[in-house]
Amino acid sequence: MCGIVAYVGYREAYPVILKGLKRLEYRGYDSAGVSLLDHNGLQVYKKKGKVAQLEETLVGQALPATIGIGHTRWATHGEPSDRNAHPHRSASGRLAMIHNGIIENYAQLKKELQNKGYIFHSDTDTEVLLNFIEDIREKNECGLEEAVRIALKRVTGAYVIVLLDQENPGTLIAARKGSPLVIGIGKNEHFLASDASPIIEYTKEVVYVNDYELAILKEDELILKNLGNEKLTPYIQKLDLELAAIEKGGYDHFMLKEIFEQPHTIYDCLRGRLDAKSGQIVMRGVDNHIEALSKAERILMVACGTSWHAGLVAEYIFEELCRIPVEVEYASEFRYRNPVIHPGDIIMAISQSGETADTLVAIEKAKEQDAMIFGILNVVGSSIARASHAGAYTHAGPEIGVASTKAFTAQLTVLTMVALRIAYAKGTISQERYLHLLNELEQVPAKVETALKTEEQIREIAARYADARNMLYLGRGYNFPVALEGALKLKEISYIHAEGYPAAEMKHGPIALVDETLPVVFVATRDSYHEKIVSNIQEIKARKGKVVAIVTEGDELIRSLADETIELPACDELIAPIVNVIPLQLLAYHIGVQKGLDVDKPRNLAKSVTVE
Ligand code: M6R
């Protein structure tokens, strides 16, 4: 979703902003722009398309400004076009602004401004907010900072805004509600960005701006205030992130790099927490709240997309091990329902980015009913992390590919550990099974390593199925959500229509689709449903469907039935989803690559969905 970068300091702002925008490309966008302020005044350059296209138009231009703002836009109000791209300029030409989020009452504000004679040059809510600020400043004859404060009190919706003012050439003004904003603190320079990736190469000292806060930045000064004009003390944190983590490191795509990082990321997730020898799981976020977690009468998991799939796997695991009823909710539905939350309920918010607007609002709603929020999150210091009462980080490192891969396996690993820790405390698991599962978890990085060795075979399978128009993904039990995740990956990366279903549910409708043109991917590793899923495979073969089966090594029965079999190491069924998803990630990736698609930045998608 929209990316924001801004700079004030002693360097030339344009190269810093341009590099920053490139680092934010992974978020998804359709146009890009910059605004720079120097002795010649305020200039705005913007273009539909990629950052590289904007860069081309500026080649050879002298751009000496040491203050500027930059933006990648993901269209909400108005089509992707040069005129709708950010930054926008105010009617007087004095101000330029970038914005991430949605101003919900923009239509009403626009009408008010039009009645006063304002003319708009774009279809955006951003231009409305900018002129609303300018109008307040002129009418009240006040400073820009005060005008921003007054305007934001009337605005509904979500925003991060950053303003440049021709009359105040050394100052950036930024504000946040609902969308992410990080300040980087350098020596005689300040950076602003939607996440830390554009900042990391210059400084590791950052301040995460909170909702309803305003930041006033000069090269040597940072002032943080609330909307009531009270000064706040910035909480400076040290980033635990290396530049290499956000670069491709020799891989063709971030998605492939992230798929191959999984043995390592899962290991990082287990490290220092799980010790199979001593039979211990130590997780501070869980240990500190073990009483509330063990006494939970119900767990509500709220999440979106891939994180929602992780929640579905966790539903099976928590119910099996902890005997706690679990409901898994799409955050976007939960936030608008009037959900029944009881005092003993725990809300688990699962999110890679920690910035997903629907998940964030869902937990804020649950907090209004006094629910305890437990976050399963990847990005340290993210909005959901800060809004949670407790939680556990997944430690997967930055995920840049839009399709979530390593975040999913890390979420499953953490959720399994949390369930085991609670089950142990509650006494709902036998010592023998507990130790067995700890052992199994410890072996996951090695098994994922083995699963990655199927890549060559999967590349060949991908070549045979890249022309498919539809695909069906089926699994049972713990593997049902894995099938959903496989289908989502394929849709996102290859634009092939794919559906995931519980294998037995197929008979209630999807079987009508089956003929010799339909590839059906079965997640059919050896588990308590094995015999049943073999019957489902036979049902597909009887109707001439093509079967691609993910099986446990040595499964001759399925091999004799399926058109393609991909063999994986044997795993306990409760742990298997972490390993079984690997070939599905690789299949989606290789089909996307063979179709010549941009797998890291699939069309229309954004990495973190910061608007509803
Ligand atoms: O950052 P989050 O985990 O909250 O994101 C949730 C979804 O937007 C995300 O998983 C999305 O579905 C991915 N594109 C899946 O690959």
Image: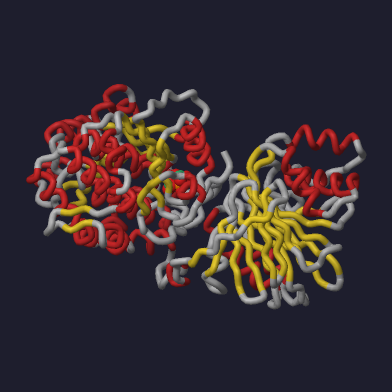
User: In the shown orientation, is residue 108 left or right of residue 382?
Assistant: right
In screen coordinates, is 607 left or right of 169?
left
Please tell me which residue is depicted at 65% across the width and 39% down the height of the picture.
157
- Within the image, what quadrant is residue 488 found in? top left
Colour convention: secondary structure
**Residue 493 in picture, x, y percent from top left:** 44, 50
Q: How many marks?
A: 0
Q: Quadrant of the C terminus?
A: top right
Q: Nearer the viewer, residue 304 or 301?
A: 301
Give above or below for 555 relative to 251. above
The reply to whether residue 514 is visible in this rendering is: no
The answer to whether any part of residue 33 appears in the image is: yes
**Quadrant of the rendered image containing residue 548:** top left
Q: Residue at x 79, y 50 (%)?
A: 146
Judge whether 244 appears above or below 527 on screen: below
Q: Position of residue 297 (x, y in %)?
A: 29, 29
Q: Looking at the image, which residue is at 52% across and 58% down?
A: 26
Instruction: Give the percent coordinates (x, y) of residue 583.
Output: 28, 52
Would residue 56 be found to the left or right of residue 121 on screen? left
Going by the picture, which residue comes out furthest to the right? 117
Farthest left residue?
Answer: 432
Q: Nearer the viewer, residue 16 or 354?
A: 354
Q: Residue at x 42, y 33 (%)?
A: 371
Which of these two is toward me, 317 or 532?
317
Residue 216 x/y as whole percent: 71, 60
Please tell me in which quadrant of the rendered image residue 339 appears: top left
**Residue 442 in the figure: left or right of residue 150:** left
In the displayed structure, 194 sits above or below 200; it is above
